[in-house]
Image (cartoon, rainbow, N blue to C red):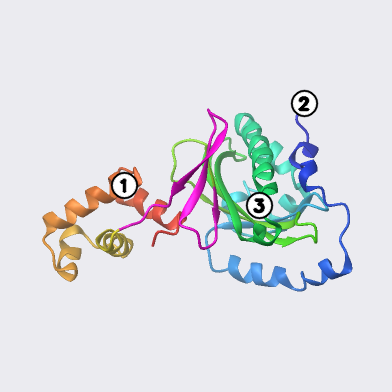
Amino acid sequence: MTNIGDFFSSRNTVTSISENERKQTADYIKAIEAFARTTYKSIYVIDYQKKGFEYVSENPLFLCGHTPDEVKEMGYLFYFNYVTPKDLKLLLKINTIGFDFYQKIPLAERINYTISYDFHLKNKEGKTFLINQKLTPIFLTDQGKIWKAVCIISLSNEQNSGNITVSKKGENNIFKYDLKGSFWKKIGKLKLTHREKEILKFSVRGFTINEMAEPMFISPDTVKFHRRKLFEKLEVTNISEAIVYATNNKLI
């Protein structure tokens, strides 16, 4: 039977924190609170030593009808209460493969990695929705284990759960996990052309195809051509999906 302890890998057991390690955390929550006020995304902080949530933002997306304090009090029980049963197993799988991957990274580089994946939440009304979670370390122990990590929650632009990737700051490649084959594969990050970025930026501002053609100095038909190529590249069907995908994946 699944329990909270299953989320805490022996590879990342944090039993104690030294005074030097503790000094690095001074007032960091204030910075996270300030960031949370500027975004619609939900943010929470995991403390792997205390095996719970140290901070939960007020942004409602992740809360499933609860207050931040209630979610913080639940900690990992929140997953058991609001993640769909199938995706709860997926989260445990991600936990295992994620820490296995992490163990192979040199200690000095571990702080620079982020893991991203999608899973379903089910709110108090019984409605299920797909979210994307990005988890990255904030503080490491002297042994290179994750002590605290920040999680950023947004609506997913994907159709299904999974979509597990690991990226490194400054790198042009990402690692994508194949759930069927149980292996990581290295792939290049998507790159948008100048025209594709322009179309996204004008679309965010509500421009129609005809309206964006003039400042781009191209015809409406050429705008349509570049927009169609953009949809194909991002594997989406409309501009709203394209904007969400590009934003979540830092393409613009």
* Label 2, label 3: how far apart the Cα atoms are: 31 Å
Looking at this view, is 178 or 207 the one in front? Answer: 178
Q: Which numbered mark, 2 or 3, is in the foreground of this view?
A: 3
Q: Is residue 147 left or right of residue 97?
A: right
Looking at this view, is 162 or 101 the one in front? Answer: 101
Mark before the other along the chain sequence, 1 or 2: 2
* Number of other residues with Cα within 10 Å of mark 3, as a class: few under 14, some 14 to 19, many 20 or more: few
Q: Is residue 196 magenta?
A: no
- Residue 214 in picture, x, y percent from top left: 15, 68
Q: Residue 125, relative to residue 166: is it above or below?
A: above
Q: Which residue is mark 2?
A: 1
* Label 3, label 1: how far apart the Cα atoms are: 31 Å
Q: Which numbered mark, 1 or 2, is in the foreground of this view?
A: 1
Residue extending furthest toward the top: 1
Q: Which stretch is magenta?
A: 166-192
Q: Which residue is mark 1?
A: 233
| Amino acid at pointer 1 | Lys
Q: Which residue is mark 3?
A: 105
- Residue 244 in picture, x, y percent from top left: 41, 53
| Amino acid at pointer 2 | Met
Secondary structure beneath label 1: helix
Q: Is residue 189 left or right of residue 209?
A: right
Mark before the other along the chain sequence, 2 or 3: 2
Secondary structure beneath label 3: loop
- Residue 122 in picture, x, y percent from top left: 59, 38
Q: Given contact means CB atoms under 8 Å apart, are the residues at marks 3 and 1 in contact?
A: no
- Residue 156 in picture, x, y percent from top left: 48, 46
| Amino acid at pointer 3 | Ile
Q: Is residue 182 magenta?
A: yes
